[in-house]
Image (spheres, grey):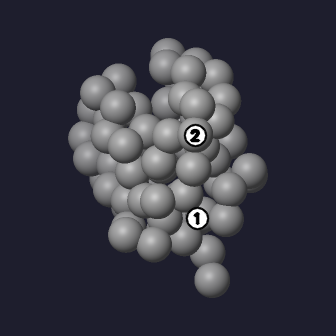
C-alpha cells in the first residue's frame, strides 16, 4: 500500500520483491503515488504504473527495468 509516496521510494520497496534492478530516473522519482499493489506480481504493478502515471517502463531484460518520465 502506498499513500502519496514518491515513486522513487515506492520502486525501491518494490525492488525487494523482484530479482534484478529497478531504476527510476530523477524526473519520475518525485511523482506521488497512492494505491494498493499486489507484490506477488511485480510485472502487473509496473504495467499499472505505466497506465496511470506519466511514465514509461523500459525493460532491457526481466532483470533490468528503468522507469522514466514521459515527455
Seen in the picture, residue 37 relative to 8 is either above or below; the reply is above
Q: Position of residue 52 (x, y in %)?
A: 74, 50
Secondary structure beneath disc 2?
Answer: strand
Q: Is 21 on the left or on the right of 52, as rendered?
A: left
- Counting other residues with Cα less than 10 Å from the Cα at mark 1, is it few (<14), some (14-19), or many (20 or more)? some
Q: Is residue 67 visible?
A: no
> Residue 34: which quarter of the image?
top right
**Residue drawn at x 39%, y 51% as measured from the top left:** 8
Q: Quadrant of residue 13?
A: top left
**Residue found at the far right of this picture:** 51
**Image location (x, y in percent) of residue 41:** 54, 23
Q: Nearer the viewer, residue 68 or 63?
A: 68
**Extreme-bottom residue of the structure:** 71
Q: Position of residue 30 (x, y in %)?
A: 46, 59
42 left or right of 45?
left
* Marked residue nearer the N-terminal end (1 or 2): 2
Residue at image mark 1: 56
Q: Residue furthest front?
A: 4
Q: Is residue 8 visible?
A: yes
Dot 2, how many residues are within 10 Å of its Cα: few (below 14), some (14-19), or many (20+)? Answer: few
Tell me the residue at 37%/43% (across/down).
9
Q: Where residue 25 is drawn, which disc sits there?
A: none
Answer whether labels 1 and 2 touch (C-beta < 8 Å): no
Q: Secondary structure at mark 1?
A: strand
Q: Is residue 52 above or below residue 66?
A: above
Name above or below for residue 2 compared with residue 47: above
Residue 4's tag is 2
Expressed as whole percent of the image width and height from the top left, the position of residue 45 reads 58, 35
Quick one: 43 or 39, which is closer to the camera?
39
For the N terminus, the quadrant is top right
Amino acid at each position: 500500500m502506498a499513500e502519496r509516496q514518491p515513486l522513487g521510494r515506492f520502486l525501491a520497496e518494490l525492488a525487494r520483491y523482484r530479482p534484478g534492478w529497478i531504476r527510476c530516473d530523477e524526473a519520475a522519482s518525485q511523482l506521488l503515488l497512492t494505491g494498493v499493489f499486489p507484490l506477488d506480481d511485480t510485472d502487473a504493478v509496473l504495467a499499472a504504473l505505466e497506465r496511470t502515471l506519466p511514465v514509461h517502463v523500459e525493460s532491457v531484460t526481466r532483470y533490468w527495468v528503468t522507469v522514466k518520465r514521459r515527455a
